[in-house]
Image (cartoon, rainbow, N blue to C red):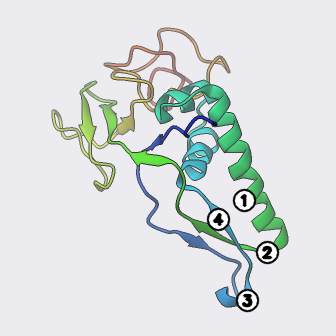
Amino acid sequence: MPRPPIERAVGSVPRVTLFKPAGVPGRELEQLDLAVDELEAIRLVDLESLSHEQAAAAMGVSRQTVGRVLERGRAKVAEALVEGKAILIGGGQYRVEPRQLCCASCGEVWTADPEAAAPACPACGAVDVRICWGGAGRCGELRGSGRGARAGEGGPGCRGRGRGRGHGGS
């Protein structure tokens, strides 16, 4: 008997759940289902520029699982764009988990509600707030692994490698 799928951690459920080509009524379009965990993998790797290892840590799964989920999601998005199909986002094996945030100004780390709007630092009020990938003190501007990242860089409170804007890197 196959092993039951592990739930993937996602930062939030998307507010917009349907994308379609402009000018074509939805009832005339074929719809492709994009699971929430597939969208999260695409967001982490393609939008946030995290490595597969970092995305795996954020989602609570193995690097290989992130690779498979990402591949499925990218294929669906490509098919929808090329063939003019609608994308319906929903379902999948996931759980919503609050993310740890890090203040780029003072280094404060705290947990925030994924649905909260534009957070400000509770310690100093700064709005330059980033997601901490892979645990406390590892700021969200830490993108990629090894692609120009230098050890020891990062702002106050950051204990990882980084090269983010205004964060000690270039």
Q: Position of residue 137 (x, y in %)?
A: 35, 21
Secondary structure at numbered mark 1: helix
- Quadrant location, the C terminus: top right
Q: Position of residue 114 (x, y in %)?
A: 33, 49
Instruction: Judge by depth and name the residue closer to the eye, 40 or 2.
Output: 2
Query: How many angstroms separate mark 4 from mark 3 (CA)?
Result: 16 Å
Residue at numbered disc 4:
33
Q: Which of marks 4 and 1 is nearer the N terminus?
A: 4
Q: Residues within 10 Å of mark 1 (few under 14, many from 20)?
A: some
Q: Residues within 10 Å of mark 2 (few under 14, many from 20)?
A: some
Residue 77, labelled with which disc?
1
In the rendered structure, which amino acid carries the disc numbered 3?
A: Glu
Query: How many angstroms separate mark 1 from mark 3 (CA)?
Result: 18 Å
Residue at numbered disc 2:
84
Query: How many angstroms separate mark 3 from mark 2 (CA)?
Result: 11 Å
In the rendered structure, which amino acid carries the disc numbered 2?
A: Gly
Left or right relative to 44: residue 10:
left
- Quadrant location, the N terminus: top right
Secondary structure at numbered mark 4: strand
Q: Where is residue 81 in the image (x, y as percent from the top left)?
A: 77, 66
Residue 28, labelled with which disc?
3
